[in-house]
Amino acid sequence: MKVLPPLYVDGLEVPGLYLFEGAKTCFLLNRESGTGMMLDRELAEQMEAGVPSGELLGKLVSRGMTNAGPAAACDRGVRPDFFLIDMTQACNFACCYCLRNPESEGKRISSEMLEHILDKMIAYCKAHGVTHISIQPWGGEPLLELDKVLYIREKMNRDAPWLDVNISIETNGSRITADAAKRLRDANIGIGVSIDGPREIHDSQRRDVGDHATFDQVMEGIQRLRENGVKHIGSISVITKPGLEHIDEILDFFAEELPDLSVKINPMHSPGRREALSLAVGAEDISVLVEKTAGKLKKLWLQGRKVKEGNFTSALQNLLARSDANICKSHGCMGGRRMLIFDQNGDMFPCEIVDYPSEKLGNAEDGVDIMDSVQTGIGKKEYFKEKHKAECDCCPWWYYCQGGCTSAILYERGCVEGVDECGCASAKALYEQAIRLITDAPELAAEMAGIRQYAGLTVEPGAARKGKQ
Ligand code: SF4
Ligand code: SF4
């Protein structure tokens, strides 16, 4: 990696440019705007010398590489469009790393409160011209509240037909009967199923409240979703410290048994259940996890086994197209600014794992516009304090990371100071691996990111396997 001298375009100084060289191509990154582009060696030499030709300057401008003025550098405005609703604390599983310590008979949201929450969202969308939102009914196990989950679709269709509403749930997969699968399909609800890999690994981490193994129930649930025509099934897989030894096995399992599912590999962070803290993946383990995952994914794709892993795909998409799609990992933590959670009392928080009373932003029944509540909170709440350490000032991944996960810092230190060290390690490892793939195997990187056209590169499906990398 080379730090380039500032570039001068139309009297504007463009600092923060980094150049990465690989076996096949070079990649230029602007750390302030998060924009990047591939360069061949000749153009990379022009950049290193600080004398880009007129043609190269034109390309830099058209890719947004020089657009580093304060306004364009960091649009972290308030535009909530992703809402979580806490439906229930009840769960029939007792996974070793669960943050919530759920109870089999936990508290559930009332129909009246759900109505108030949805009305508040609709009023906000109307007032601010928002035409697309995502809602995630959350738990505990959200399928224990299936009727209320389906009611969200019914209510939005009836009361806000002008609003495009994407609804998705993350489920433990044990409650997916054929009838539930049909109803979820008919309501067009996206499903993410938690499964931690092959039987032995899954069953060691995800037991039910009676301490029984759950692998078979979950696989049967996924099969019912498939049989009943549910599209876009995803999965979430939590890796614990012992699981670091089994990354290849876990990804092979997804490639062989669940090739139609995307997967998101999430390292277990503390605090989970106290007795399971030794299972947490620490900052020191993250680079091993990311390196093994990226290496295995590359091998699988080159064999034509296209396992889509959410975190790695997001990093590639951010670098190649500044996608900003991942609320936690595309443009720093966007809790509060893009994501909001309503709990069962209708209280509104910036993130599902920050439910400290002091961080409450408002309530479903307070009559205050959502935008006003968040903007007031940004000036007052600990959650919205800037995260930073000296190293961030010269870090190429600044745009994407911005100090990592605010909740992790709050949990660890009780206040927002410094950065999330696990998030820092994760951003460094993830983006270093993504850049390596882009510069060594650009067509494969674009294919894995789902990008067909990239800066003059046309990616044919499977091209990367035909000896082109
Ligand atoms: S927290 Fe770490 S990865 Fe993130 S911007 Fe700062 S130095 Fe970079
Ligand atoms: S606090 Fe952490 S989990 Fe919550 S939105 Fe921010 S980055 Fe994501």
Image (tube, helix red, strand yellow):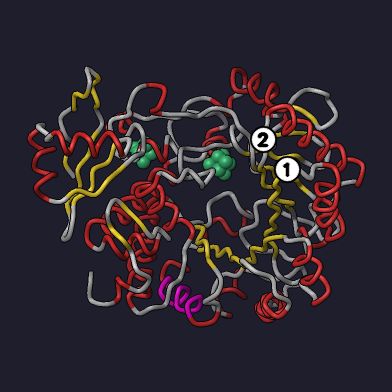
Q: Nearer the viewer, residue 270 or 450?
A: 450
Q: Residues within 10 Å of mark 1 (few under 14, many from 20)?
A: some
Q: Which residue is mark 2?
A: 130
Q: Is residue 99 above or below residue 238?
A: above
Identify which residue is drawn at 40% across, 27% down. Answer: 72
Q: Residues within 10 Å of mark 2 (few under 14, many from 20)?
A: some
Residue 3 horizontal/vertical position (percent): 18, 36
Q: Residue 399, percent across and down?
A: 39, 36
Which dot marks residue 386? none
Left or right: residue 247 compared with residue 269:
left
In-image side of 250 versus 371 (left or right): left
What residue do we see at 50% from left, 78% from top? 253
Amino acid type, mark 1? Leu
- Residue 170 position within the rendered picture, expressed as x and y whole percent measured from the top left: 67, 59
Q: Quadrant of ligand 2?
A: top right
Q: Which mark is residue 163?
A: 1
Instruction: Name the residue nearer the viewer: 443 or 328.
Output: 443
Q: Would you say residue 407 is visible in this rendering?
A: no
Q: Is residue 163 magenta?
A: no
- The answer to whether 309 appears left or right of 126 in the picture is left
- Residue 243 x, y percent position in the rendering: 47, 68
Pick the front one: 180 or 428: 180
Query: Do the residues bearing badges 1 and 2 touch, measured as CB atoms within 8 Å?
Result: yes
Residue interval drawn in magenta:
246-255
- Image quarter of the C terminus: bottom left
Residue 211 in sight here? yes
Q: Secondary structure at mark 1?
A: loop
Name the residue: 78% across, 36% down.
Answer: 122
